[in-house]
């Protein structure tokens, strides 16, 4: 197949796989600490307010969606999390997430007929996912449902048929994390950046790079308090803001930078990420009554790649799968898209 830039290539059997995944995921959603939690990223390590400001030098061909007006600022709610479906101690190896919800956003929604008035950007602290396609994702989770031996069998299947993905998983689980505010986060999956539709724009990935990342790593995260990442976030924001540079990375080679394979890293030397905005999380007390109320409100919200303008619509099979899974998870939790 001759791949083209900025194009998607859905698998013919993808719809059936997505339905299977919805059944698998919602079936695993059980009450934890008194309520049904998210299907993934069940444990929050912080929920804070911030300001997302568009740079004044955004290139003309990037001025779509929330980036169309240089210097504009959006109020934002940011949820930091561990990616597991279970609420576990922070010292356990895991991917760490950042979910950003820009508020009071006007425009054409990515899902027709829905007007979310927000723009969500979801990212994790690793540039790729340990699964390439919906088929791999569904197969892995299907094996996990095997009684008694599910997890070992799923790990063995992954090691036998997708060893490179095991390597990705080990890198994610082995990363020593000190403070959620000092991590670089990547979208992992691609997104459209351009006018609504399938032409006139480009496929991009995005990343968030912190201005400060100097805290020494703990010698043994497993010996730290169960909520040490929450404590680190709260301690910093009492006296010092956190700033992230939001960057977009355009696809420049459809084979080396695939849209449909989220296990492949887009080389940042070949296509350098370009700064387009700044996320500033100001000084705040997350343990104050206001901070605790926001944290509770955050748990009732839905963060999704598909809470999006059409100019930023998610692309690729994993994102198409996420659309159905996130909506099903949201429905089972009784969550809502906006505060």
Image (cartoon, rainbow, N blue to C red):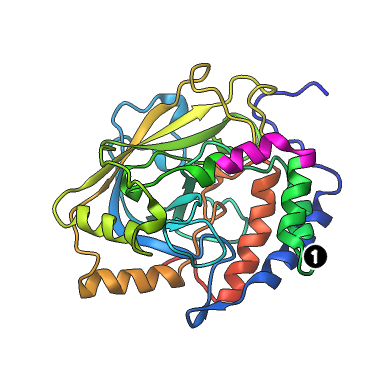
Q: Quadrant of the N terminus?
A: top right
Instruction: Say which of 139 and 306 sits in front.
Output: 139
Relative side of 280 to 219, left or right: left
Q: Secondary structure at mark 1?
A: loop
Instruction: Say which of 307 and 47 sits in front.
Output: 47
- Residue at screen point 86% across, 44% down: 12
CA neighbours of label 1 inside 10 A, class few (<14), some (14 to 19), many (20+): few
In the displayed structure, 73 sits above or below 337; it is above
Q: In the rendering, at what x and y percent does residue 248 appear?
A: 46, 31
- Residue at screen point 37% across, 74% down: 296
Q: Quadrant of the C terminus?
A: bottom left
Query: Can residue 331 be seen at all in this image of the molecule?
Result: yes
Q: Residue furthest bottom?
A: 34
Instruction: Find residue 325 and report its image quarter.
Output: bottom right
Relative side of 233 to 191, left or right: left
Q: Residue furthest left?
A: 239
Find disc 1 in the rendering and name its residue: 146
In the displayed structure, 212 sits above or below 23; it is above
User: In this picture, which residue range is highlighted in magenta?
Assistant: 160-170
Q: In the rendering, at what x and y percent does residue 129 appear?
A: 60, 42
């Amino acid at each position: 197949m001759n791949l083209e830039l900025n194009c998607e290539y859905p698998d013919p059997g993808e719809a059936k796989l997505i339905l299977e995944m919805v059944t698998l995921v919602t079936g695993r959603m059980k009450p934890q600490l008194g309520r049904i939690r998210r299907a993934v990223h069940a444990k929050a390590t912080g929920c804070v307010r911030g300001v997302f400001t568009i740079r004044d030098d955004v290139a003309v061909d990037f001025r779509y969606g929330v980036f169309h007006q240089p210097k504009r600022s959006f109020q934002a709610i940011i949820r930091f999390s561990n990616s597991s479906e279970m609420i576990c101690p922070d010292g356990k190896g895991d991917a760490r997430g950042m979910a950003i919800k820009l508020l009071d956003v006007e425009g054409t929604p990515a899902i027709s007929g829905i007007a979310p008035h927000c723009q969500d950007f979801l990212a994790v602290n690793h540039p790729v996912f340990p699964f390439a396609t919906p088929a791999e994702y569904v197969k892995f989770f299907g094996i996990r449902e095997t009684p008694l031996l599910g997890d070992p069998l799923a790990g063995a299947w992954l090691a036998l048929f997708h060893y490179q993905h095991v390597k990705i998983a080990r890198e994610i689980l082995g990363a020593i994390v000190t403070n959620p505010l000092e991590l670089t986060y990547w979208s992992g999956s691609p997104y459209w950046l351009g006018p609504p539709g399938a032409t006139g724009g480009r496929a991009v990935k995005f990343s968030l790079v912190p201005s400060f990342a100097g805290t020494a790593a703990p010698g043994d995260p497993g010996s730290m308090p169960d909520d040490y990442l929450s404590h680190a976030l709260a301690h910093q924001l009492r006296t010092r803001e956190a700033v992230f540079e939001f960057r977009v990375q355009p696809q420049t080679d459809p084979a080396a930078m695939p849209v449909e394979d989220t296990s492949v890293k887009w080389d940042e030397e070949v296509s350098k990420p370009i700064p387009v905005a700044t996320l500033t999380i100001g000084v705040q007390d997350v343990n104050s009554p206001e901070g605790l109320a926001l944290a509770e409100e955050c748990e009732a919200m839905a963060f999704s790649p598909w809470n999006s303008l059409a100019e930023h619509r998610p692309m690729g099979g994993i994102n198409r799968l996420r659309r159905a899974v996130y909506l099903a998870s949201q429905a089972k939790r009784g969550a809502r898209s906006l505060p």
